[in-house]
Image (tube, helix red, strand yellow):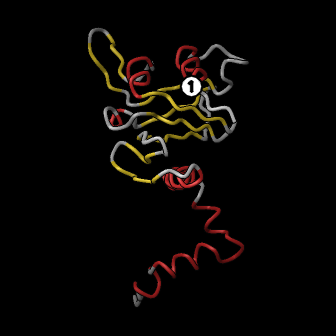
Amino acid sequence: MKYNLKENLSDSSLVQWLIKDGLKELKNIIQVPGVRGSVVERKIAQDLNSQFTDLHGSDEIDLLGRVIETKMTKSINNGLFEIGNVLSKENKCDFIRVIDLINFRWFEIPHNVFFDKIHGIRINKRGKKKIVDSFTFSASYNVTDKKAIHNTNILLKYEIIN
């Protein structure tokens, strides 16, 4: 098979592919969670005039010098949102920013509050420590349910209201 990698996979070729046919491919690829997360991290840092870093354990340094890790969710499972891959952020940021892309709400939880008080990241079952590396909170923010009340209350305490 004859295929010119440089011609077909260069940055400019990829951009052209993404924007052809009324942005069809771009609209499809933004639905991939890892891609969406990467775009959201970059865009919010830029929108807030922060320095985007994308370091292991943090995504940006804001105008106050705070190191922030951004996590987002866009899917509800059994009435809950879930945020994963959080343990690798421990001791690497000042705040965990949680963005809900269904209700368009966001929260900035201080590092120590997050890792000391959020339930579910580390679970002890029958004397054995189990590392879950994720936490859940209510998708209705406990307006219509009583799910993950503790975690939901912590998030609500640190909600950013514009």
The answer to which image quadrant residue 85 occupies is top left
Task: Look at mark 1 in the image and give the residue it sits on.
Answer: 158
**What residue is drawn where x is 38% and y is 23%?**
112
Q: Residue 63, how many percent across, how many down?
A: 49, 45
Q: Residue 48, how many percent across, how many down?
A: 57, 49
Q: Seen in the image, is 10 located left or right of residue 106?
A: left
Q: Is residue 71 above or below residue 44?
A: above
User: What is the three-letter code of the residue carrying label 1?
Assistant: Tyr
Q: Count the marks: how many?
A: 1
Q: Is label 1 in a helix, a strand or a loop?
A: loop
Q: Residue furthest front?
A: 64
Q: Seen in the image, is 130 located left or right of residue 140?
A: left
Question: The N terminus appears in which quarter of the rendering?
Answer: bottom left
Q: Is residue 14 above or below residue 133?
A: below
Q: Seen in the image, is 49 located left or right of residue 66?
A: right
Q: Nearer the viewer, residue 42 or 129?
A: 42
Q: Residue 42, how many percent across, how many down?
A: 51, 55
